[in-house]
Amino acid sequence: MAHVELNELVKEFDDVTAVDGISLDIPDESFTVLVGPSGCGKTTTLRLIAGLERATDGEIRIGDEVVNDQRAYERDIAMVFQNYALYPHKTVRENMRFGLEQHDTAEDIIQDRVAEAAELLQIEELLERRPAELSGGQQQRVALGRAIVRDPAVFLMDEPLSNLDAKLRVQMRAELNKLHDELSTTTVYVTHDQVEAMTLADQIAVMDNGQIQQVGAPTHVYSNPQNMFVAGFLGSPSMNFLEGTLGRDSDGKLQLDLGTDTHDVPAEFADELEGYIGERVVLGIRPENISLNQDGIAANVHPATVQVVEPQGEKTVLELDLDTDQTIKAAVDPDTTVEMDDSVNLRFDRDSLQYFDPQTGESLTYETASEQKVTA
């Protein structure tokens, strides 16, 4: 096992900067996920750690060593690829042995490690088959087994579940969690799938345009995004953003004018938003934090018209037009009975509100939100 550290890491391809000065601390035995949209630099970052790309600038440390000048085979890492990269003419056993043979590992050690990995992954009965005789899930297990037998300091995984169907992906996520618990090997995992990131990681790094936008525990990043990109990228459906002008009501309390509707700003955010009176501010609210107002309380109620009803089993997603001509989504109880064109009143969970600067996209209330969650 090893601690991995990236310091001001840069990778340029001609006139394109794929990785733009990122710094990231990956603790020993952690499961760190790099997540972001296609082209954000996450796979390039993984390849830099692996030694498959050479950094333009910056430093990569694995354990106590700076490894920038080491080739891939000199770094104590094992990589699992999206396409599994199994040798089609070799059996499962031969595929799993291959890396150890290249490092002149003793035969008895090879046999023991292959047997242990096969038992761990429950693929003992597949050892004499070839990749073409295996299902996608079985091939994924073999690819994992080939990495496990290396007993590396760091596992690097590049979207290893993306070729599997939805049900198998859920199963393999659970298997990866179990494997990490048993092996405790430092793991860096790349995906564009936010569900994978949230369920697998103990630390996520959200990337965009070659830069890390936010790092932290999945639940913290989800609940306390530092900017609108992170807020909008994590979550399905994604966070709603409503833009208005910040002012005061007749009692002097902060209020966001959304046009034909207003939103009362909770008092705990007053200090952070005081300097934005008269300015445009974006209110962020996640769909699951919106409910239908059925208790008759008039305060902070937002009239809306149902446009789309999407039953999704564990929830029903509503697409609604507010009276302000802005569209939002709400994730409500599946037993909720509403139809298209129904008029409803919405309530926003005051403990889940976010406020952003529309020019910079940065959160205006990140510190306050963080403190509330920690002390809750």
Image (tube, grey):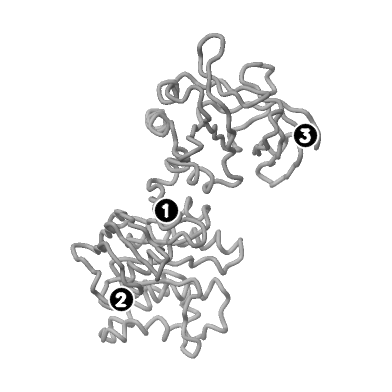
Mark 1 is on which residue type?
Ala
Considering the image in quadrants, where does the N terminus appear?
bottom left
Residue 352 tag number: none
Frontmost residue, 264 versus 362 = 362
The kind of secondary structure element at disc 2 is helix
Q: How dense is the environment of label 3, judged by Cα within 10 Å: few (below 14), some, or many (20 and up)?
A: some
Residue at image coords 37%, 78%: 114
Q: Which residue lies furthest to the left in this view?
A: 64
Q: Do the residues labelled 1 and 2 touch (CB within 8 Å)?
A: no
Q: Where is residue 340 in the image (x, y as percent from the top left)?
A: 80, 37
Which label belongs to residue 72?
2
Q: Nearer the viewer, residue 333 or 34?
A: 34
Mark 1 and mark 3 residues within 8 Å of each other at the beta carbon: no
126 vs 53, nearest the viewer: 53
* Mark 1 or mark 2: whose residue is earlier in sequence: 2
Q: Mark 1 points at which residue?
A: 201
Cα–Cα span, label 1 and label 3: 37 Å
Depicted 47 relative to depicted 184: above or below: below
Mark 1 Cα shell of 10 Å, populated few (<14), some (14-19), many (≥20) = many
Q: Which residue is drawn at 42% across and 83% down?
A: 95
Residue 253 % position (x, y): 51, 14
Query: Which amino acid type is shown beneath numbered disc 3?
Result: Val
Visible residue check, residue 1: no
Which residue matches tag 3?
338
Three-letter amino acid code of the residue under disc 2: Ala
Label 3: element kind = loop
- Going from the N terminus, do you reach mark 1 or mark 3 first? 1
